[in-house]
Amino acid sequence: MKSEFKDKWHEAMKVQLGKLQDAKAYEIAPRPPSGCTVLPGKWVFDLKINKDNEVQEFRARWVICGNRQRPGFDFQESYAPVARGETMRLFLSMVAVNKMIIEQVDYTAAYLNAMIDDRVIYMRQLTGFETRGLDGEKKDEICLVLQALYGLRQAGHLWYETLANALRDMDFQPLLDEPCIWIHREKQIWILLYVDDTLIAAFKAAEIDWFKTMIPFRYKDLGKPARFLGSSLSRNNENGAIFLNQAAYTEEVVVKSGLQDASHVYLPMKTGYKCPDITRDPKDKDVRGQNNKDIQREQNDDDDVASWAYDKPSVSKEEASAFMEDIGELGWLADKSRPDIAVAVNKLQRRTSAPRQEDIDALKQLIRYLKGTKNLGILLGRNGDNNDLVGYVDASYQDCEDGKSTEAYIFFHAGSPISWNSRKEEIVARSSTSAEYVAMDGAVREAMWLYKVMKQMGIHQDLPITIFTDSDNAHTIMKKDNFAKATKWLDARYHFVRHAVRTGIISFTLIPSAENVADALTKPLGREQFERMREIMMYSEGKK
């Protein structure tokens, strides 16, 4: 190791080795007969940074190269549920509204609590810590894996099942529609799981203490949560509201891009930005049933029309790679705490495999916008006196060059956004009314999921759930018994929307376009309109 911090890294490696040995995660064994797979492993290094952006800890983790495992032979099940951003926000919003106490624990070497099933897994010895003979030479020995080491394809699954069994023994039950939220009905304890992190909420501190006493795993008691799922959390002691923000992560993105000294801009994306779509599969068929390659043959005399289907990068390989990495990081940000950049990220994601200079410039604009707004976040439980669930839905008709539209929805609980989505529709809508109607399908399905989670947590939500739309025609269709000409060609699943309305689960309310918050998630807006919508969605901690 050539790093100037090699002593600190080596010490971190010894700490990891000690944890593995204490957990009896493996045992030294003779090399197995030929034909048996012996998985390699590697050291992965990381730094733990505190809230002041200072190095708090050097970390090293030994990871098995699970990519060498054979499905059905070396492992069977690998699925493990992970809490989504909307799950976290809904959970925290209900904690805030109900003024519950909340604390956090971080399980120590979580995966090492899970035993390997009846499969035999061999691993090479840890690099730098191999067994040696009296002559100092490395012994021809390997490791028999006993615990779910990081990197194993089934490790997450085994850990979740181990934790789930322990929670059931404590009389917790998972929600039917969200396996990362568990409830203790009698003690009124809610917990939210995210791999090795757990948020614990209760009305009495004694109930949280009971949980910490009963859980059979070693953990770090983090007290009041300050960070979860990559987000900073802070709480208003007066009204219980929880402020969720990713300022530190945003700063990292800005510095990494080299734009820390650039001036900030007021919009995440220019209204005139054009995004030729390159994500379309040539095997797909358009609304006429023609193959895309056939269409291109018809249009090959007009390169401006057809070239989008087989676009190539117009920037260097290094720039294209950096573009893809930056968009991935911004996607995480848009998903967790920044609905105001959702549409900009969505449009740029369509260009990741073949960015142009215009896309690089649009990315820089977005990062410069984030530089000036890094302190924005979401105040969960913002309006504790009214904890109703309401949504907004909208569509931007045929704004994609393959003729598809962009749809979006955003849902608020207690005045704060908890779930949002901006994406290209799956089909080519034949009219703006149809595009709006298709968008309603996704919004209705999300509303019903949110309602079920709230109900299973014991939170009352009046029906119908209100979803606001600015489409007069789509709104009218809901009230008709017969299908309108504009929508009769749609797949039957979209008429699930009509069923939800007729059965009293959903109610669509017509509003002016200027009041539809989802409009900010379908297309880039001008500054005045964008800032008005952002005022509804976002919050700054220093705001009065």
Image: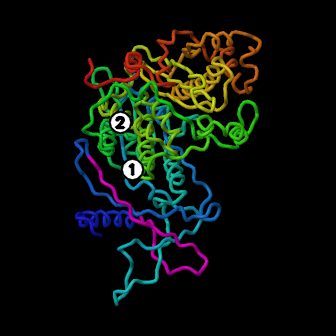
Residue 495 position (above or below residue 125): above
Callout 2 amino acid = Ile
Residue 447 visible in the current orientation: yes
Which quarter of the figure has residue 254?
top left
Q: CA distance from mark 1 to mark 2?
A: 35 Å
Callout 1 amino acid = Tyr
Residue 27 within the segment the image draws in magenta: yes
Which residue is more in the foreground, 275 or 371? 275
Q: Is residue 250 left or right of residue 274?
A: left
Q: Is residue 265 left or right of residue 152?
A: left
Q: Is residue 414 left or right of residue 300?
A: left
Residue at (58, 15) in percent of width and height = 463
Which disc, if any, is residue 107?
1
Residue 237 position (above or below residue 289): above
Range of magenta residues: 23-49
- From the image, state whether disc 1 or disc 2 is nearer to you: 2
SS under mark 1: strand
Dot 2 corresponds to which residue? Answer: 367
Which residue is more in the foreground, 73 or 352? 352
Q: Is tag 1's residue or tag 2's residue first in the polypeptide sequence?
A: 1
Residue at (56, 22) in percent of width and height = 396
Residue 160 within the segment the image draws in magenta: no
Sort mark 1 into few (<14), some (14-19) or many (20+) by Cα contacts within 10 Å: some
Residue at (40, 27) in percent of width and height = 95
